[in-house]
Amino acid sequence: MELLKRTIIEKGKIIGDDIVKVDAFINHQIDTFLLDQIGKEIKRLFNDKKITKILTIETSGIPFACLAAIHLNYIPVVFAKKQKSAILSDECHTANVFSFTKKQEYQISVDKNYLSTSDQILIIDDFLANGEAAKGLIKVANEAGAHIVGFCSIIEKSFQSGRQNIWSDYPNIEIKSLASIKAIDNNQILFNED
Amino acid sequence: MELLKRTIIEKGKIIGDDIVKVDAFINHQIDTFLLDQIGKEIKRLFNDKKITKILTIETSGIPFACLAAIHLNYIPVVFAKKQKSAILSDECHTANVFSFTKKQEYQISVDKNYLSTSDQILIIDDFLANGEAAKGLIKVANEAGAHIVGFCSIIEKSFQSGRQNIWSDYPNIEIKSLASIKAIDNNQILFNED
């Protein structure tokens, strides 16, 4: 997605050779024109699937999930909640997720009322890096017996193992990214072709 | 806002005489048609102010801030981040906020790059109950030297002291709510007139 790549180049902050900070338009301040365009692009990519619900995780995935859902004819969004300590509850589907950024495990949970066997679910998250959050969301949707239509990340870092990590456990999941970073080299961001 | 009130009555879960759970359409699952309508209503309420930015707080305020911002001609959204332990940083405006729900204090912070003296800021949050989060956001915006145009909550519980609590410290803040709950009585939700 050209506008997204251009914004990453113009406003992303490169830290070392593997981090791009996108606080200026995605993670802390949100560029809402870009957000709306991203919603439209996700609709374009997944319009032929009969998606009934979007599943994401707090916090930064939520705006993108909402705009995609609005453009996909106002389907509902469900966001998984994060907590540091494990909560056992009959009312929730849960998964443990290891955060490489924070170097700790946390638990994600979704109320059983909000996912069902008749759901056709698109999973959305802001980043695909190690794939841990995505795998947690897939586990939760599977536990609910829902059908997963695909996973869409806004920004993928293809030089990390997220895609392979997801496919090693869930080989049939369709994965799409709106911008896929191949490498950060010499203070420059290199993208994969669409 | 009629659609919001109707949804609260139809899908809210009353717990005791002071809690309405809105997990089914605001806090965990999001009704995105309602979300879009809420964005339009906030635009209608604040269209005459020259708002340059919306400030909110993670997590549940973010979708409403984004849709309001999109309808207000794609202005940026900034969301304050929450952390349990205080972080001292020259790079952030911070405020301490006491959560009555969780019975603990947390810190909110906003990167100084994303608020400026030329900003005309609308503050949005999902609930106005005790007013603590709102006061934290007002403090942060004031610290940045920004002008605050108003505070808008999606749901106000007017039988709690939020509005008075804000006005006792900041008497000039304009406060609006899209649905204002007067009381929960006999398992029924009673609204204030618009």
Image: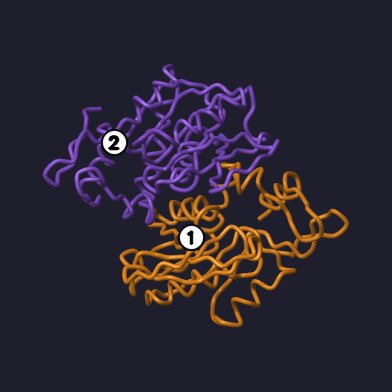
Chain colours: A orange, B purple
What chain does badge 2 belong to? Answer: B
Q: Nearer the viewer, residue B155 or B94?
A: B94
Q: Distance between the residues labelled 1 and 2?
A: 26 Å
* Numbered disc 1: secondary structure: strand
Q: What residue type is labelled 2?
A: Lys
**Residue extending farthest top:** B172
Residue carrying label 2: B157
Percent x, y of residue B114: 64, 35
- Say which quarter of the image contains residue B90: top right
Q: Where is residue B80 in the image (x, y as percent from the top left)?
A: 55, 41
Q: In which quarter of the image is the N terminus of chain B?
A: top left
Q: Residue pushed farthest left? A: B186
What is the count of numbered marks? 2
Q: Is residue B146 shown left or right of residue A161?
A: left
Residue of label 1: A82
As helix, strand or loop, the secondary structure at mark 2 comes to: strand
Q: Do the residues labelled 1 and 2 touch (CB within 8 Å)?
A: no
> In the figure, is residue B13 to the left or right of A12?
left
Foreground residue among A108 and A73: A108
Local crowd at mark 2 within 10 Å, few (<14), some, or many (≥20)?
A: many
Amino acid type, mark 1? Lys
As rendered, which of A103 and B62 lies closer to the eye? A103
| Subunit that carries the residue with mark 1 | A
A131 versus B89 height, above or below = below
**Which percent across, then down, holds residue B93?**
62, 34
Q: Residue A142 carries which label?
A: none
**Does residue B79 appear anywhere in the picture?**
no
Instruction: Write the residue at 40% across / 46% down.
Output: B103
Q: Quadrant of residue A176?
A: bottom right
